[in-house]
Image (tube, helix red, strand yellow):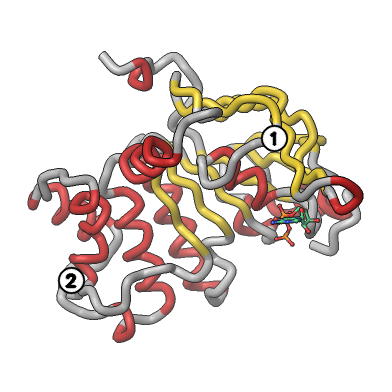
Amino acid sequence: MLPSNDPTSPAVRLASVTKTYGRGSGAFTALREVSLDVPRGVFTAVMGPSGSGKSTFLHCAAGLDRVTSGTVRLGDTDLTGMDETRLTELRRERVGFVFQAFNLVPALTVLQNITLPLRLAGSRVDRAWTDEIVERVGLAGRTGHRPGALSGGQQQRVAIARALVTRPEVVFADEPTGALDTVTAREILALLREAVDGMGRTVVMVTHDPVAAAHADTVLFLADGRIVDSLDAPDADRIAARMTTLGAHA
Ligand SMILES: Nc1ncnc2c1ncn2[C@@H]1O[C@H](COP(=O)(O)OP(=O)(O)OP(=O)(O)O)[C@@H](O)[C@H]1O
């Protein structure tokens, strides 16, 4: 059995992670000795003032960027020191990504976008599973469209379906509602919630928006590259109040 399947290990574990960009006098430390376990089957939001290190945290936790010191584990797999080929494989097969700008391939249909990670990994495209995902994200009847023919909310649904199709251990979402209106944003957050509650996935989401973060089970607060607080079962008012004390204009 692959060690990553051990259900008792956290989905992601950061131990004393520091990330410094650049060198010498121009060096900037964006994460400082961050240690954290992200439990499985939980929706975690990451908030903090602009420049506090949210995107850096997400990129390091997801294997998109390398840490300067410390370790990052996905399940029981240590990402630190992994070569680029294995990291690419790991990101493709064990992690899902949702970005603010959707990042769909314009020339491909909705269905082709959704199944792309499977085809890149050389995996079989399971029609019943793909149909289920399409149904769950509310895209039935639109699978033959190109992304350009869809609304922003529909494009983000495609991105979520694409992130879920490989049954990833963790879905990382970077400001997934940043480009959407309030009503559409709420629908997308409900989908991420459903990925956790209905599909047992683990979601880690960076957001500026206290209302978005209130959909999570836990909110982590970053300030100056450190995790300074967390809130369980958060509501938007408490999140906004906490952000204000961190110097952010929520
Ligand atoms: N490639 C880079 N080179 C140098 N400095 C960087 C780089 N990426 C980020 N930084 C710096 O690291 C700090 C943290 O950046 P990061 O993007 O992680 O913050 P953030 O909390 O996501 O900010 P925002 O909410 O504005 O997106 C910032 O001061 C930023 O300028």
Q: Quadrant of the N terminus?
A: top left
| Mark 1 residue type | Thr
Residue reaching furthest to the bottom: 149
56 up-or-down from 209: above or below: above
Q: Which residue is mark 1?
A: 68
Question: What is the x, y in percent for residue 104?
Answer: 36, 69
Residue bearing mark 2: 143
Estimate the x, y position of residue 85 in percent, counting from the top left.
38, 40
Q: Is residue 244 visible?
A: yes
Q: Earlier in the sequence, mark 1 or mark 2?
A: 1
Judge depth for marks 1 and 2 and give the one in front: 1
> In the image shown, does 213 or 176 lie closer to the viewer?
176
Whether ligand 1 has any atom under 8 Å from the Cβ at mark 2 is answered as no
Query: Mark 1 vs ligand 1: CB under 8 Å?
Result: no
Residue 45 at x, y = what percent?
61, 45
Residue at x-position 35% and y-position 73%: 154
Mark 1 residue crowding within 10 angstroms, few (<14) / some (14–19) / many (20+): some
Picture residue at 42% right of the left edge, 68% below the top: 103
- The Cα–Cα distance between marks 1 and 2, rounded to whole angstroms, is 42 Å
> Label 2's element?
loop
Q: Specify the amino acid type for callout 2.
A: Thr
Q: Nearer the viewer, residue 78 or 51?
A: 78
**Image-based side of 32 in relation to 182, left or right:** right
Q: Residue furthest front?
A: 24
Name the element at disc 1. loop
Task: Give the left or right position of residue 78, taking residue 143 as reference.
Answer: right
Report whether 218 appears left or right of 99: right
Q: In the image, residue 195 lies at what x, y percent?
A: 37, 46
Q: In percent of the image, x 32 and y 65: which residue is there?
A: 158
Image-based side of 74 in relation to 209, left or right: left
